Every structure is written in C-alpha cells, then in structure tokens.
Image: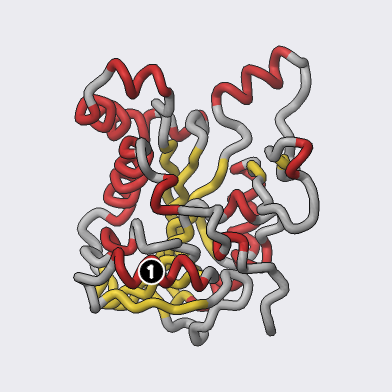
Amino acid sequence: MGSKRRADYYDGPAHDYVSYWDGRDYEHAAEEVAIRKLLGDNMFEHAADIGGGYGRLSLLLRRYAERVTLAEPSKRQLDVAADFLAGHPEIERLQTQADDLAFADGSLDLVTMIRVSHHLPTPAVEFAELSRVLVSGGTAIVEVANVAHARNRLRYLLRRRPLPVKPVDIRSPENRHDGEIPFVNHNPHVVIDQLAAVGLRTVRVLSVSNLRSRTLKRVLPHRTLVALESFLQPVLAPLFFGPSIFLLLRKR
C-alpha cells in the first residue's frame, strides 16, 4: 500500500523521548499496571509494540510473548532502542509505520499501540492495519488520548457545550502548522466504533493516569500513588475519567 504518513517527527535532536520520561515515573507505572491487568496470565507467540519509541514498554511485553518486535517509524528512536534494549537481544527492532505495517496478514497474536493515537487525527487506516496483521482471535491493546476526561467534561459542561465527536487539536496556536507534530484528543466512544468497524471488538476498558497531578506526585509516595491508580483503573473506566483510556480488543 505504501505509507502516506510522515514518520520522522521524532528523528530530530529536539525530541529526546528518553528525557521526556524523567519525572514521569507515575505515568509509566500506571501504563504498566494497565497492561498487566489487561493481559493477565495470558501468553502469546509474537507481540508487536506499534510506535513503541525506544522500547519503554517492549520490555514488559517480553513477559507475555515468546517473541517481541518493537515496530517504530523513527530511525532515531530505534537507534536509542539499540542501547536501551542492549541487554535484551530477543526483542527485535523494525522500522515501519502504523499505516503500512511490515508484517504479513495474520502474523501476530498480540499488538499494542500506546501513546500513538494522539498523533493520529484520522486513525482509521492504522486501526485497519492492526486488524490486518492480527490472527483471528488475536489480542490488541490500544490507548486513547481521551477528550472526555473528567476535567474536560467539566469545562464543556460549564460552557454548555457537548463533548466533541471529532478529534480535538490540542496544540498551541503557534504550533498549528505543517511540519509540526499533530497532537489530538479523541472521543473514546468514536474510537471504539472505529475499531469495531475493522473487526476489533472491545472486551475491556481501563481508565489510566487518573491521578496525574503535580501536587499529588509531591505529597503522596510513589508506591501509594500507584496502588491507588491500580484500584481506580477499573472503577473509573465506565466514566472514561482519566486522560488516557486503555482498550483491550479481540479480533473477530
């Protein structure tokens, strides 16, 4: 098919994705907690971490799959991954884009796509690719940058406006130009319908990073914060409370 998306956003030296995670231990732990909850005791043959950057979550996937491929469009991120994953030669690295994945039809039984949807204003093609590469009955975890999170819902309520259905560009006005990285939030109900349209049925939802707050990070010990997060993820899921929604999907 051939990719139509630009893939070099994170190739520039200004985007140090490793340093981005400095001070974000809670967010990283919250995402690991969600993945563990969703995958449980299941084991898979071949997992792919789509748009996985330098392999931050690929290490966790290795606990659930005999074979893991970090599938990332940025060459620079893959070069960083070579060092980050140096002690894990069993994790493969592949330069490929989410809208044109270099995997055969039905060749994977687990795919994850975390912190990618916020770069995809129109993710239908990427969702179709996830479905294509999954075996029938295969599992996917897709994270949604959530426009319906609690603070936003209050804002729209105070303005007497309905929650948006279309993706919302959250970039500052000066960054809304060609060549700048897209950043959008999605309506999770719409995303669930889009995934269903390509044969990916939602079987479980978690609300993630529910306690994302500088103040809470300062006053609560990390272990306490993560324990509370773990408790709240399924409790707040029906409300789409957090800024990040994790969907467990099964291919029909």
Q: Where is residue 246 in the image (x, y as percent from the top left)?
A: 45, 47
For the point 53% across and 59% down, the residue is 13
Asked where in the image residue 44 lies, by quadrant, the reply is: bottom left
The residue carrying mark 1 is 110
Colouring style:
secondary structure
Mark 1 is on which residue type?
A: Leu
- Give the image location of residue 9, x and y in percent: 61, 61
From the top left corner, tell me how far across and down residue 185 is, in percent: 64, 42
Residue at 54% x, 71% y: name it.
73
Report helix, strand or loop for mark 1.
strand
Q: In which quarter of the image is the N terminus?
A: bottom right
Instruction: Pick whichever, 138 or 12, lies toward us.
Output: 12
Seen as rendered, the residue at the extreme bottom is 104
Looking at the image, residue 159 lies above or below residue 78: above
Q: Residue at x 47, y 82 (%)?
A: 106
In the drawing, does residue 230 fall left or right of residue 116? Answer: left
**Badge 1, how many Cα within 10 Å: few under 14, some, many 20+?**
many
